[in-house]
Image: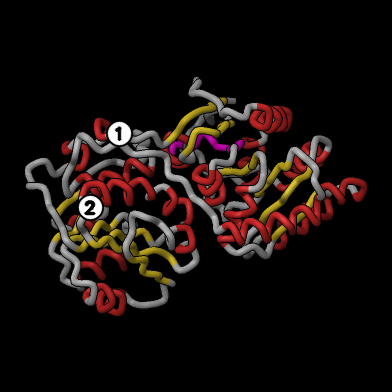
């Protein structure tokens, strides 16, 4: 098992030169109205936050709009680098979305979410400069500036992939990016803290476990999470979070726990995104697989113990959370990296990350108030 603790998301201009974006011959663009399209999953949006900061520093006078998903927009509603958040529930056609975008009179669009609908919409909207990913045929056809980076061979971190789009319009060697910080609404934090206090009292450490991931990556089986919650409850209180569609998983965990520790474990299935952010900001350590709440914890400054497989398309080099308080536990490489495994074999592979190592990582993260330094094998 590979263990990696350390700092992620420390971007600098040296890591993205014009040749990285595959368009060195084109002159820099200076849009007055810029659209950034990132209307896919929660984790992808979180990893695009550095791009928003870079865009603001590169084009301080520009009007910057972000097209994002209806369900994920709460994390950017108060972002200081964005002038306007356009919320998209995904139900409209490309023509309908294009009509909306045409009203924005944008000079340039960064289509970071490389979907057919997005490509058609920015093209139909008549946006003059369209930065797209050249490795999608429609992106090559409908874009007029192209990002040529390969995303998995070798792995490119998703935050760097997003940054390549804005660097296609221009670069500035003086720009230095900070790790994004998400600050939940204080009133929401106060309300959620009172709820957790009511369920768990003042018990510390306050561990969190998010066992679901909408199949975004390989994961532990439910019974291993039951054992983890039981072990962590011996050291403090445990907050277990879940999202829509994960009711069955959470019920399975509830039924697997010994009734004698029920007072030390609180389950939360009804939190909206703002409330989830608040809850994650109030815990001492979060254990999670590679999914949206992992990325939220990274930008909230909450220590994370993250479980990763060895598969190239879901490796930490591509998906590690931003921030500097992460312990990554990665299962060893498979004999055949391209093998398609049954769910049982996936679980067996992920269980090579031992329960003892995860518990130890939680206790170490709680004890280390200053955060670990980089020490990757």
Residue 317 location, quadrant = top left
Of circles 2 and 1, the one toward us is 2
Residue 83 location, quadrant = bottom left
Give the image location of residue 296, x and y in percent.
53, 49
**Residue underneath mark 2:** 60
Relative side of 1 to 321, left or right: right
Give the image location of residue 113, x and y in percent.
34, 57
Residue at 50%, 39% in the rendered image: 339
Q: Which quarter of the figure is the N terminus placed in?
A: top right
**Residue underneath mark 1:** 12
Q: Nearer the viewer, residue 144 or 81?
A: 81
Question: Label 2's element?
Answer: loop
Instruction: Check if mark 2's residue and mark 1's residue have beta carbons within 8 Å.
Output: no
Magenta span of residues: 304-312
Q: Nearer the viewer, residue 96 or 169?
A: 169
Distance (Cα) linking label 2 and label 1: 18 Å
Q: Nearer the viewer, residue 278 or 156?
A: 278
Residue at 55%, 34% in the rendered image: 326
Please tell me which of labels 2 and 1 falls first in the chain.
1
Residue at 63%, 40% in the rendered image: 345
Q: Is residue 319 visible?
A: yes
Relative side of 369 to 35, left or right: right
Residue at 74%, 38% in the rendered image: 205
Residue 86 location, quadrant = bottom left
């Amino acid at each position: 098992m590979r263990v990696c603790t350390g700092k992620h998301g420390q971007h600098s201009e040296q890591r993205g030169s014009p040749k990285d974006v595959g368009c060195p011959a084109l002159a820099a663009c200076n849009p007055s109205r810029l659209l950034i399209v990132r209307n896919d999953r929660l984790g992808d949006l979180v990893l695009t936050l550095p791009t928003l900061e870079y865009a603001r520093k590169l084009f301080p006078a520009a009007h910057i709009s972000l097209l994002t998903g209806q369900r994920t927009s709460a994390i950017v509603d108060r972002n200081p680098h964005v002038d306007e958040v356009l919320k998209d529930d995904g139900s409209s056609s490309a023509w309908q979305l294009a009509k909306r975008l045409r009203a924005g009179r944008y000079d340039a669009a960064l289509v970071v979410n490389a979907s057919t609908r997005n490509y058609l919409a920015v093209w139909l909207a008549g946006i003059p400069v369209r930065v797209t990913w050249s490795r999608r045929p429609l992106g090559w056809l409908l874009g007029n500036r192209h990002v040529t980076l390969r995303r998995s061979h070798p792995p490119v971190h998703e935050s760097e992939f997003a940054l390549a789009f804005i660097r296609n319009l221009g670069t500035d060697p003086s720009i230095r990016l900070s790790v994004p910080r998400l600050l939940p609404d204080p009133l929401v934090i106060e309300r959620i803290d009172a709820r957790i206090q009511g369920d768990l009292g003042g018990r510390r450490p306050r561990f969190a476990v998010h066992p679901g991931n909408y199949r975004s990556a390989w994961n532990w089986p439910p019974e291993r999470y039951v054992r983890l919650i039981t072990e962590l409850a011996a050291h403090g209180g445990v907050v277990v979070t879940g999202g829509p569609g994960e009711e069955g998983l959470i019920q399975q965990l509830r039924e697997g726990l010994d009734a004698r520790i029920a007072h030390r474990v609180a389950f939360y299935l009804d939190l909206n995104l703002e409330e989830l952010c608040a809850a994650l900001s109030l815990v001492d350590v979060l254990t999670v697989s590679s999914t949206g709440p992992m990325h939220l914890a990274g930008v909230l400054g909450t220590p994370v113990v993250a479980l990763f497989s060895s598969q190239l398309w879901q490796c930490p080099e591509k998906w590690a959370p931003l921030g500097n308080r992460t312990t990554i536990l990665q299962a060893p490489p498979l004999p055949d990296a391209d093998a398609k495994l049954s769910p049982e074999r996936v679980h067996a592979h992920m269980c090579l990350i031992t329960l003892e190592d995860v518990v130890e990582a939680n206790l170490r993260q709680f004890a280390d108030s200053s955060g670990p330094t980089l020490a990757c094998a």
